[in-house]
Image (cartoon, rainbow, N blue to C red):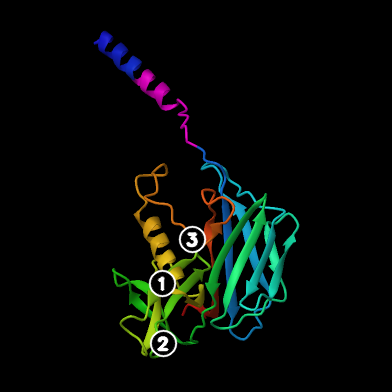
Amino acid sequence: MKLYKILVFLALTIFTTSCEEVIDVKLDTASPQLVVNASIEWQKGTLGNKQKIKLTTTTGYFNTTIPKVYGATVFITNSNNVIFNFTETPNTGEYVCTNFVPVWDEAYTLTINLNGQTYTASETLKSVSSITNISQNNKGGFTGDQIEIKSFFNDPPNVDNYYMFRFKSNITTIPSYDIFDDGFTQGNENFGLYNNEDLKSGDNLDLTLYGISKRYFEYMRKLTAVAGSSSGGPFATPPATVRGNIVNQTNAKNFALGYFTLSETDYRNYPIQ
């Protein structure tokens, strides 16, 4: 019996010691890539002249800060070769334009010159319908006990349209998105849907409806699919890298991440009842 107790004590000692061992996980680190956040948004009721583009780079998994990009030359041109310059705000990685002119169905080209590399992307500014009504259902979701919000708008007939809803509540740090087209509801009333099991009376929900291009619709659909299919823990390998529309004209292999998109938007704030 005494020998048994000694063996148990030794086993527990070894187990406890092994649990305290620090595991050093070696992760491959690729060269930083440019990340472009260039979403030009023309909110209804505004001039749309104030716009911002943010440049960062990719970084290591364990890094807690996202590197900002300084010293780039950033501008957008329209189909008439009018140039809208984006001026760098020092130490922010943000480039701002105060005289942008948004026009429905106008074609625009983004150009970024950085460290001897030239990146370009082209898109068309898409219009959007107005949000007409917002409804609340307190018996929504799969469990029938979640607050469910529907935001309605009327789809224009005889033309293919693509939409994105952005929902941001005061109880979440990351927005959620609803992306869809009018393939089965053309010319009819459409709606975006949001629910969250933690949403309650007194919370606030920001809703933004975007008119988007077909290319951006497909990009966002792939992006959300990749995000939703990532499994296997924090070190799982993403099934694919989703490429946007930004092309490195100097070195195609050194591609940038992100997307250049232009949208008319409609915004509402909804207090949860």
- Structural distance between the alpha carbons of marks 2 and 3: 27 Å
Q: Is mark 3 on a helix, strand or loop?
A: loop
- Structural distance between the alpha carbons of marks 3 and 1: 16 Å
Q: Is mark 2 on a helix, strand or loop?
A: loop
Q: What residue type is labelled 2?
A: Asp
Residue at mark 1: 179
Report x, y in % for residue 223.
42, 60
Residue 268 forms part of the magenta stretch: no
Q: Which amino acid does label 3 sit on?
A: Gly
Q: Is residue 93 at least partly visible in the picture?
A: yes
Q: Looking at the image, which residue sits at the far top? A: 3
The first of marks 3 and 1 along the sequence is 1
State yes or no: discs 2 and 3 in contact (Cβ < 8 Å). no
Kindly identify the residue that appears in the image at 48 percent across and 86 percent down: 129
Residue at mark 3: 244
Q: Is mark 1 on a helix, strand or loop?
A: strand
Indicate whether 193 appears above or below 8.
below
Q: Give the range drawn in magenta.
A: 12-28
Kindly identify the residue that appears in the image at 34 percent across and 45 percent down: 232
Residue at mark 2: 155
